[in-house]
Image: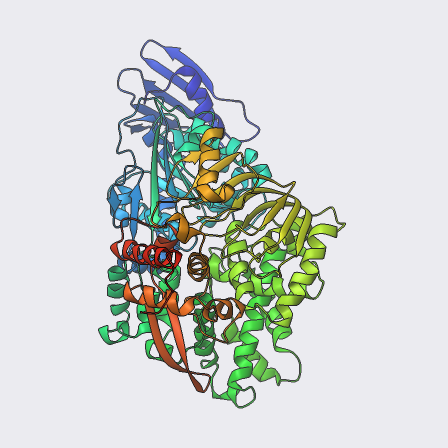
Amino acid sequence: MIPTKASLAYDLLPFVDIGTPSPKISEKTEGLTANFVRDGREIKLQIDNGTGKVVFTKKGFPAKGFTSFANMLASDDFANLKKWAKSQAELLGRAAAAERRLLPFNARNHKNARFEGVEQVNALFNSQPRPADAAEVILIDGPAGIGKTKLVEQLALLRAEAYAASPTSLILHVRSRGRVLSNLQDLMAFSLQTLRSNTTYDQIPILLKHGLIVVAIDGFDELGDPNGYELAWSQVNDLISAARGRGVVLLSGRDTFLGRDRLFRDVQSLRQDRDVVISLTVEASTPDQAREWLKSRGWTDVHFKIPAVASLLDDGSFALRPVFLNLMAANLEPKRLREESDSFLTPLLVKHMLEREAKLFGDAVEKIVSRDSLEDFLLRYLIEVAREMADGQSESLDETTLSWIVEIALGDGYPEEVVRLIRNRASVVAALKPDLRAGYKGFVHSHIQNYFLSLATLEAVGKGEVPKFLKRNVLGSEMVAVFGDVAAKAAGTPQSKAFLTHGLTMASLYGGVDRASRNVGALLMSTLALLSDGEVLRDSDIDETVVRGTASKVTLSKVSIHQLDCRAADLGSVLFDDCKIANLIANDGTRLSPSFPIPRLIALEGGADLVESDQIDEWLTRHGRNATATVVNGLASPALSEHPLFKLLGSACRVRQYWLRLGDDVQAEKILRSKYWDELAAELRGCNLLREEVRQAAGAKSKFTHIRMREKILAEDPSDPDVVKLFENLNARVTALAGGGQLRVS
């Protein structure tokens, strides 16, 4: 790409010393000449019009030749990309390289082509021809914990390690760092600082345009609150405009936010007929991949035959996501799951992690502090760490702050030597990892951070407190979803009841001008399944929220929600009174009530956005707004869809816990004590969709029940023969009942 007189002046300006004149450009027959000052020395460039070759002369030094203007920008005299690559390779280091070799990876592009491994993804860059004035955008989306951030890190490492032998565009990994509304230039400056690069943020668009770097914005959906994404989109719009030429921009975010349709709709600078947009959705490992990977970490075929383990590795299980596979491999003893009573995945893994960590403090500590007390300390410590990070809008804390939190969580009355030993061990617990900044620590994954922050939130709001992070921050959908699981786990406890009582008041009547009422409203929406029938949430404005499970018979009055994610949720019993919902995220498992308001947009999981009014109305009608016309894929007959068996099946498939057991929680009790449960269980069992295991738990034997293929059952998936057989059998039973027969267990 040979520069013109105007483009040369524009591209050189960020590299000129502050306080010195702008580049002086002259145009002659043979080419362009530029004079300017950089690093305190006078510089002269001569660019050949025909070949694009550059002669670079620094006053007092011999002239240098470059094959192109881009090669000159990459040199030691400008961006010094060799130094960048070396620093980045060292920073990402051996740990990332090891994970790249071990962790299974799956993805599909928008044409449904499958990708396995970072090398295949790396080959996507600049793989499609495009005009000289076009930009390329690569979208990477997927749910939380699926490995998006790790993929970007692996791509950056791959390119940095290969740069010396084969120079290619390096990746500037830009992350939101936990801030509420971030300026991309600030985030780019921070990323450059961690690399100890002499490149400045205003030079990035120039390096991007010439294909020397890729700007990867990781967690793009976290760059603003839903009512303020216009700023984020505007900044990306400018960045894509700057990428025209040889540049590539990578955007990574949750699957409910990013998509080709939305990108073309919201980024005005994108031209559908000229710019290249490649979409890649990261998927969980397959059960076979997960088992093979766990074998490399010491698990055996004997372990996989344990029913509790087998259910965790079922197709579609959360445990197949990298964040959970890592936790399982590091902390779970598979044989102990035979005696495990915890039905929720994250609390189960965290419990085992804390038990393992409590054993590592040493005899000197255990002589003074019991093992149980150490587990309690670790739990309190990590809760306070998560809260401190959220209060400070940061993803990491320095060693001094962590040391201070240790003393608070531990309490008084311990010898100084014991406190010192505990402080040293607490700084290296498995839940935390070194940050990019030296001397700082962050959580190993945002899901784990959100879990401990959810515990802090449940406790604080239950006491009537309004933490700083609830006042200042925007609680994203990942945090709200995790909180919903934490609240479900605590259902029926005094702490849960206190949260619901104070939360309902705070969401509707809180008088502050900050964000507390919005955030608490979002959290309450995630607990609709826990509220008592007849409760009312009123006069609440909510940014974004997540609803899972089967909602109680509650009323939402004058509630405005910008974005509602209710995939696989049943809101059929909710009365919406004068409510507004702007954007709805849903799937085939979603059920709505006749009073559900008409949204502006419906984003379908794995499908295109619905924006036309007739499309939206037709979809809402099929998913509950018209009870007599609610047919998803037609597997459930009209008679079955109105029968209590069908409602019980939906409730059982929508619970968040993996195992159902009598006495575990309110939701399990409702399902297992239903007069229709034995009949339903028999049908599930006959279709190979039910796992049952008797375990020794809490001193007594209990039956644990797990429904397989829950998402496919909710979606009435016609491609799965077991699901099809289940609905055929249930339809036949309900038909027989209508004809005068009786439901019976076969």
> Position of 107 compared to 552: left or right?
left
Q: How is the image coloured?
A: rainbow
> Position of 404 compared to 130: left or right?
right
Q: Which residue is rendered at x = 24% and y = 76% of the image?
A: 302
Q: Which residue is rendered at x = 26% and y = 19% of the image?
A: 51
Above or below for 427 versus 522: below
Above or below for 152 versus 695: above
Q: Position of residue 344 (x, y in %)?
A: 45, 67
The foreground one among 465 and 341 is 341
> Position of 267 compared to 504: left or right?
left
Q: Position of residue 405 (x, y in %)?
A: 61, 69
Above or below for 684 versus 205: below
Q: Residue furthest bottom?
A: 367
Q: Which residue is rendered at x = 39% and y = 77% of the image?
A: 703
Q: Residue furthest top?
A: 29
Q: Is residue 204 visible?
A: no
Q: Is residue 633 visible?
A: yes
Q: Position of residue 732 (x, y in %)?
A: 32, 56
Q: How many marks?
A: 0
Q: Position of residue 306 (x, y in %)?
A: 30, 75
Q: Residue furthest front?
A: 740
The foreground one among 500 and 131 is 500
- Quarter containing the N terminus: top left
The foreground one among 496 and 271 is 496
- Quarter containing the C terminus: bottom left
